[in-house]
Image (cartoon, rainbow, N blue to C red):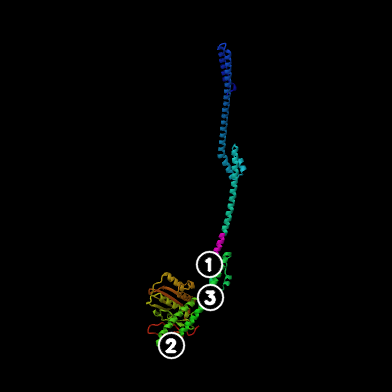
Amino acid sequence: MKAPGAATAPLVAVLSVLAVAGAVAVLLAPSGARGWAVAVVVTAWVVLAVALAVAHALARRAQRAASARTAEAERLKTSLTALEADTVHTADVALPALLRLVRGGVPAADALGRVPLPRGPRQRKLLHVLAATVEGQEQQTAALRTESTRTHDELGRENARLRDELHALTAEVERFTRETLPSVAARLREGESGAAVQAEVYLPEQPLLRASVEAVLRELALSERRALAAQTASAKALSRVQAKSVSMLADLRSMQERHSEEVFGDLLKLDHSTSQLGLMTDRLALLMGGRPSRAWNRPIVMESILRGAVGRIAAYQRVRLHCSSNVAISGFAAEGVMHLLAELMDNAANFSPPIDEVHVYVEERGTGIVVTIEDSGLKMADAAMRRAADSVAGRTTDLAALQGTRLGLAVVGRLALKHRISVNYRPSSRGGTGVVVLLPRHLIAQESRESHAVAPAAPSLREPAAPAAPSPREAA
């Protein structure tokens, strides 16, 4: 910036030159016009002086304004540089350090004291606001983390409790299905009352499961009572049919002795039909827990046992007996053995061609009497043979599990269990299926053959007739 004297020197010089020029002009003017010239020169000089003074003042003002703008620009540049430096410092140094301290658990006030703060008040305020905000967020995050950990622990404990309860329920359900339910069903089938069984049986501790188990037991007891009542009623009805069948057989045999040869054939057919009816009624009675229609108080020789069994089936003419044994079956087991063999012979005849014969062999062994029944029908499939083996072994005795009208093998199974008789299937040497029946020694009578009850042979027709069943001397 120039000094005040230096700024006004050109103006003074110009005014001096103009004054000299005016004086020269006055001197050169004619004497008569010198007054006018002096006035003009003075006026012009004054006007020029004023103009120059005004121009000088305006120039000075413009110069000062330019200087002020320059100074303001320098100040703004300096401020901008400082602001930029503060911003860089805040972004690169202060803010990361502050966030690291606050997130590390240092309180916001302490963190602000440990961080080199920028010089600008706005940056400082920004850091204070950010520190407070981050501190609040960290506190909320810590609280949420604590709550999440607590909730996770509670859920873990609840999970473990529910898992333990589930395992306990599973164990109780498994125990109920494997132990309790079969035991209850067996006791109810044996005739025990539902209340007595339920009072003694183990019940689960879980209330809902306990209520469900009690409901199942009540329904099972009710079902067993209904089944037992129906079975008892059926057994009573069958016993009356059995009695009538025995009475009809006795009447028919009495008539065979009284009437002539003309009606003998018809009577013999009626006798055989009645024997088949007796087999069917005995079959149903045994399945329902009843007893056979006949009983024997004396031993029956094996040949009569076989003839009596053959006389009860429809295809009796196809059965060929091969028996040379003199042994007899004790009276208490004679009817059961006869019925068992009749069912096996009937099954062999039904599942073999109607023109083929069924052969029955009897052998005496050290373990008892072996009866083999062979047919020449189609060989049984493995699955069918397994089902038949289960039936004759007594493992399929539930009426609901029996298929259709095939009840004979189930009766064989019950009789085999009762008398400890072994029944096994095997392929037959004749191409079909063979059944091997082992009658144990405890069923064999020790008396001589002369004291055994021997069935009189039925009178023969001109065509082969059914062998007569042995007549009971006295009902046991």
The residue located at (55%, 65%) in the rendering is 172
Q: In terms of depth relative to the viewer, which is nearer, 47 or 10? A: 47
> Mark 2 highlights which residue?
257
Please name the amino acid that badge 3 sits on. Ala
Q: Quadrant of residue 4?
A: top right
Q: Is residue 170 magenta?
A: yes
Disc on the earlier residue, 3 or 1: 1
Label 3: which secondary element? helix
Disc on the earlier residue, 2 or 1: 1
**Which span of residues is magenta-colored?**
162-171
Label 1: which secondary element? helix
Graded by Cα atoms within 10 Å as few (under 14), some (14 to 19) or many (20 or more), the crowding at tag 3 reads few
Disc on the earlier residue, 2 or 3: 3
Q: Is residue 33 magenta?
A: no
- In whole angstroms, how far apart are the C-alphas of marks 2 and 3? 43 Å
> Mark 3 highlights which residue?
229
> Mark 1 highlights which residue?
177
Please name the amino acid that badge 1 sits on. Thr
